[in-house]
Image: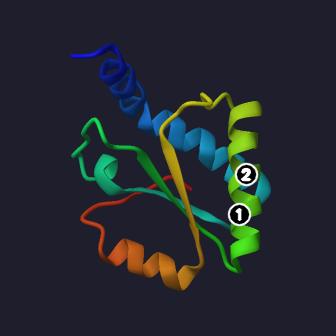
Amino acid sequence: MSSWVKYHFTHLRRWREYAEKVSKAVRDLIPDAKVYVIGGVAEGRTTIYSDIDILIVIKNTNSATRRKLLIDILERAIDTYGLPWDAPVELHIVGEERAREYLKYSRNFIRIL
């Protein structure tokens, strides 16, 4: 197994820790948001292509708001809570209606906040 694969799986094994760091950053910026881990990690099917999909549900959203929040959340998670800059997290910031679709089609999801 290559060193990159081992390194990547080391990150994936820390998914809960990383999700909690992101969740704390979300809570600081958007106290009424909900945070879930979705996708392969939540479903127990990680591969070398996996990342840690984090669904962030907010009440009001538009593309400009989501873009700014994405940057603000990651910066805060890294700078304040110690999320590694190269952690394989992918944030999905959506409104409540879109979140229902994500959760409806997920085989499993884990609520963090």
Residue ID at (50%, 52%)? 112
Of 64 and 78, nearer the camera is 64
Left or right of 36 on screen, residue 113: right
Residue beneath the point at 28% across and 35% down: 48
Residue kind at label 1, given as amino acid type: Arg
Count neighbours of disc 1 (C-alpha within 10 A) and say few if under 14, some if 14 to 19, many if 20 or more: few
**91 to the left or right of 104:** right
Amino acid carrying label 2: it is Ile
Task: Indicate which disc residue 17 carries.
Answer: none
- Give the SS element for disc 2: helix
> Residue at point 68% right, 45% down?
74
Residue 93, placed above or below residue 15? below
SS class of the residue under badge 1? Answer: helix
Is the residue under label 2 in contact with that under label 1 (CB below 8 Å)? Answer: yes
| Mark 2 Cα-neighbour bin, 10 Å: few <14, some 14–19, many ≥20 | few
Q: Give the quadrant of residue 75.
A: top right
Residue 98 visible to an observer of this rendering = yes
Residue 31 in sight from this viewpoint: no
In-image side of 3 versus 92 (left or right): left
